Amino acid sequence: MVFRSNMSLALEEARQAAARGEVPVGAVVVAPDGTVIAAAGNRTRELNDPTAHAEMLAIREACALLGVERLIGHDLYVTLEPCPMCAGAISNARLRRVYYGAEDRKSGGVAHGARVFSHPQCHHVPEVYDGVSAAEAERLLVDFFAARRDDEP
Ligand SMILES: [Zn+2]
């Protein structure tokens, strides 16, 4: 039940991102005791920051809140397969587990592309669980990009 509500929260962040005109991706950091520490959606457009992916913002927020640079024992829930940048940040943050929803064949860096966690240089490899609420996460992305296409002349 806790498991589902954490991804539900990430999906809610993704929906809010879409409402702001951002690519709908949401992420949540959960403490070892199950407490949600941080939740964020993409804000790359709003912040004019190509690194403002949901995962980056949630990790930064959690670290700032706790006053630590590593989130040992913490888990990350994200609606889309992390890109190579975020996968690197996840490793540096020493997150224990990553649960993600939709796969990202184009920009993903976990199961696709750079496959960051599969490299010997990757100092910390989290446990990865894919496909969590994948259909719902994917629908948000498909609807968002379809709507944007319709806006174009
Ligand atoms: Zn990313």
Image (tube, rainbow, N blue to C red):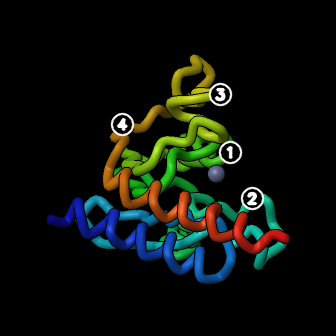
* Labelled pair 2, 1 in contact (Cβ < 8 Å): yes
Q: CA distance from mark 1 to mark 4?
A: 18 Å
List the residue tagged with mark 3: 114
Q: Is residue 106 visible?
A: yes
Q: Earlier in the sequence, mark 4 or mark 2?
A: 2
Q: 12 above or below 31?
A: below
Give the CA separation, mark 1 to mark 3. Answer: 10 Å
For marks 2 and 1, the one nearer the N-term is 2
Horizontally, is 39 left or right of 50 in the view?
left
How far across and down, in percent of the image, does residue 136 sit?
37, 60
Q: What residue does disc 4 label?
A: 127
Nearest the eye: 119 or 92: 119
Number of other residues with Cα within 10 Å of mark 2, as a class: few under 14, some 14 to 19, many 20 or more: some
Which element carries disc 1, helix, strand or loop?
Answer: helix
Counting residues from the start of the chain, the first of labels 1 and 4 encountered is 1
Above or below 124: residue 35? below
Q: Amino acid at mark 3?
A: Ala
Q: Quadrant of residue 126?
A: top left
Circle number at residue 85 = 1
Q: Amino acid at mark 2?
A: Thr
Could you give the CA–CA distance between mark 3 and mark 4, rounded to whole angstroms? 17 Å
